[in-house]
Image (tube, rainbow, N blue to C red):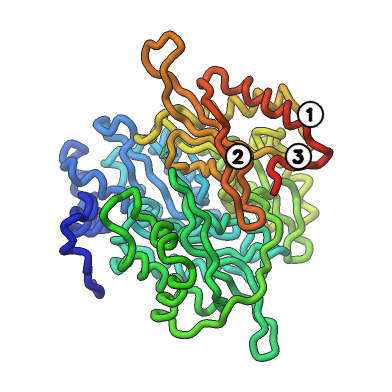
């Protein structure tokens, strides 16, 4: 340990903080083989929270001993061996469920403690890891899923993301942060990595330095969702590619050493940033990094919300990338094996995951595109999905998540299919469903956000699933969170209520008008 935990003597630390002072979260990796040998009942209950540092959560109900596992996929780039290894884990251990998350990671369910060491071995063989996928630590770094092939990127960010990710992974200098910590590094001009909802985000920019136009990044700090959402604020800085890691380390060090550790609900970096403001944060950051140039010129254009459907020319002449829909982010292992086979047979074996919970197959020679699209798997994993299923996102929900109040994934899929039968629109409407205020499904930035709650049944006998409806979220023009409509709707009536809402929108809008308006 190379730093002093100056907060250790604070008597008001919350219980999680006290536990983190006794055990570093990453040490759970050393304990897992023993628990795997001795069985679930050998794990003391007080150790359960530490499993998050290994990317593991206990599913609902915890006592049954099934784990959900999240695997980091920095910038969403998977090679053939990685994709087939992940598909194999879903097939052999995860009841065939393969989920793409809103941070480009992969999630499995139904894992038993005895299976975890073999899963870790498989992941390690192909250079993947779960370390930092959950817990009070640097999470999966999101980025441009088109990095390296993108005609709309300023810089190929793959090596930068790798350098930063490798620096933080398994790094005990940064494994005891006040709370979860989310980073995005992207040079895609359409903000494919949702910069403003990250704790720290590097976005594309240029600056005149010594008479030359130099590509680099601007820096946004302090974004985050959950029940008190904040949009990240830009600091007056320009960062050249070779300084990204230093700046990422500086921001993370500030969070570690100055972030709040008394109440879990006020521990995210966004609260420190809200109190300090961008000027004070910048001054502190420069103490760590030394002088950095001031802001240049942003290269961010219209937000694409992380969607890439269809066939598109790459930066490399003669090659295309193809964006496909994964309904509600969930596939079977067989579908993933098929995507990997197809990607290898027609392209270079890569698959990219998007934070819209979808996938891209890159590097397809133009002359092979037509044949590729005839493959059977693309009947469901569609290149031209129907209108509402195409833009529906859902968190894990009550099926597996201990914090969930309502069921989400299947419900969102059913509602999207219903709306596709009922209503036709000339613009996409992004609908995000979440099972609680934590907002893993990023409902605040949706055109229509649906947040699960419980309410009394009409007969006043017990509680039923219900939803609050929010409208008008976007990350265009720096971002705006959606606003709550009055009242709530019980789960059974949600689909027809949404149909009415969308019918009203259709009637009132002018041709081509999108759902939000500034
Ligand atoms: Fe669970 Fe809530 Fe996150 Fe959904 S938003 S996965 S219910 S914590």
| Residue named by callout 3 | 427
Question: Label 1 vs label 2: CA separation?
Answer: 30 Å
Residue 455, image quadrant: top left
Q: Badges 3 and 2: C-beta atoms under 8 Å apart?
A: no
| Residue at the farthest right position | 511
Disc with the residue nearer the chain's start (3 vs 1): 3
For residue 394, above or below residue 147: above
Q: Nearer the viewer, mark 3 or mark 2?
A: 3
Q: Secondary structure at mark 2?
A: loop
For residue 502, above or below residue 70: above
| Residue named by callout 1 | 507
Q: Nearer the viewer, residue 134 or 492?
A: 492
Disc with the residue nearer the chain's start (1 vs 2): 2
Q: Secondary structure at mark 3?
A: loop
Please say whether residue 348 is visible from this viewpoint.
no
> What residue lies at 17% left-to-right and 36% top-to-bottom?
41
Percent from the top left, x then y, of residue 509?
78, 35
Classify 10 Å Cα crowding around label 3: few (below 14), some (14-19), many (20 and above).
Answer: few
| Ligand 1 in which quarter | top left
> What residue lies at 49% left-to-right and 36% top-to-bottom?
434
Residue 293, image quadrant: bottom right
Classify 10 Å Cα crowding around label 1: few (below 14), some (14-19), many (20 and above).
Answer: few
| Residue at the farthest bottom position | 210
| Residue named by callout 2 | 326
Q: Nearer the viewer, mark 1 or mark 2?
A: 1
| Residue at the farthest top position | 459
Disc with the residue nearer the chain's start (3 vs 2): 2
Q: Badges 3 and 1: C-beta atoms under 8 Å apart?
A: no
């Amino acid at each position: 340990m190379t730093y002093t935990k100056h907060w250790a003597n604070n008597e008001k630390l919350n219980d999680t903080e006290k536990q983190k002072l006794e055990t570093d979260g990453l040490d759970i990796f050393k304990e897992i083989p023993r628990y795997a040998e001795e069985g679930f009942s050998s794990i003391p209950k007080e150790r359960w929270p530490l499993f998050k540092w290994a990317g593991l959560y206990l599913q609902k109900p915890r006592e049954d001993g099934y784990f959900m596992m999240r695997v980091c996929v920095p910038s969403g780039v998977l090679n053939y061996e990685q994709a087939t290894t992940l598909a194999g884990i879903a097939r052999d251990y995860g009841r065939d469920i393969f989920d793409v998350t809103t941070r480009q990671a992969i999630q499995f369910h139904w894992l038993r403690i005895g299976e975890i060491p073999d899963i870790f071995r498989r992941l390690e063989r192909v250079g993947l890891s779960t370390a930092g996928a959950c817990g009070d630590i640097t999470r999966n770094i999101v980025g441009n899923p088109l990095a390296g092939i993108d005609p709309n990127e300023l810089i190929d960010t793959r090596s930068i993301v790798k350098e930063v990710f490798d620096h933080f992974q398994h790094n005990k200098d940064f494994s005891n942060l006040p709370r979860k910590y989310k980073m995005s590094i992207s040079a895609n001009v359409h903000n494919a990595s949702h910069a403003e909802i990250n704790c720290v985000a590097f976005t594309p920019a240029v600056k005149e330095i010594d008479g030359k136009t130099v590509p680099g990044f601007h820096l946004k700090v302090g974004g985050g969702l959950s029940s008190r959402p904040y949009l990240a604020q830009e600091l007056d800085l320009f960062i050249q590619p070779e300084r990204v890691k230093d700046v990422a380390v500086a921001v993370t060090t500030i969070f570690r050493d100055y972030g709040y550790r008394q109440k879990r609900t006020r521990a995210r970096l966004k609260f420190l940033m809200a109190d300090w403001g961008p000027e004070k944060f910048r001054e502190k950051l420069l103490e760590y990094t030394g002088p950095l140039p001031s802001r240049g010129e942003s290269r961010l254009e219209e937000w694409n919300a992380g969607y890439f459907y269809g066939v598109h020319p790459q930066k490399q002449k003669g090659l295309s990338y193809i964006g496909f829909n994964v309904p509600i982010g969930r596939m079977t292992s067989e579908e993933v094996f098929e995507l990997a086979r197809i990607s290898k047979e027609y392209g270079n074996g890569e698959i990219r995951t998007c934070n819209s919970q979808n996938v891209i197959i890159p590097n397809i020679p133009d002359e092979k595109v037509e044949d590729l699209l005839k493959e059977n798997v693309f009947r469901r994993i569609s290149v031209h999905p129907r209108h509402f299923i195409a833009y529906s996102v859902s968190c894990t929900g009550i099926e597996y998540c201990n914090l969930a109040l309502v069921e989400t994934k299947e419900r969102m899929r059913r509602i999207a299919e219903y709306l596709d039968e009922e209503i036709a629109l000339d613009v996409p409407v992004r609908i995000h469903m979440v099972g609680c205020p934590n907002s893993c499904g990023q409902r605040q930035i949706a055109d229509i956000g649906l947040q699960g709650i419980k309410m009394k049944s009409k007969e006043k006998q017990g509680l039923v699933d219900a939803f609050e409806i929010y409208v008008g979220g976007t990350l265009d023009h720096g971002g705006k969170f959606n606003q709550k409509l009055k009242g709530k709707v019980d789960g059974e009536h949600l689909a027809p209520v949404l149909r009415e809402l969308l019918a009203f929108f259709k009637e009132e809008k002018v041709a081509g008008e999108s759902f939000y308006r500034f």
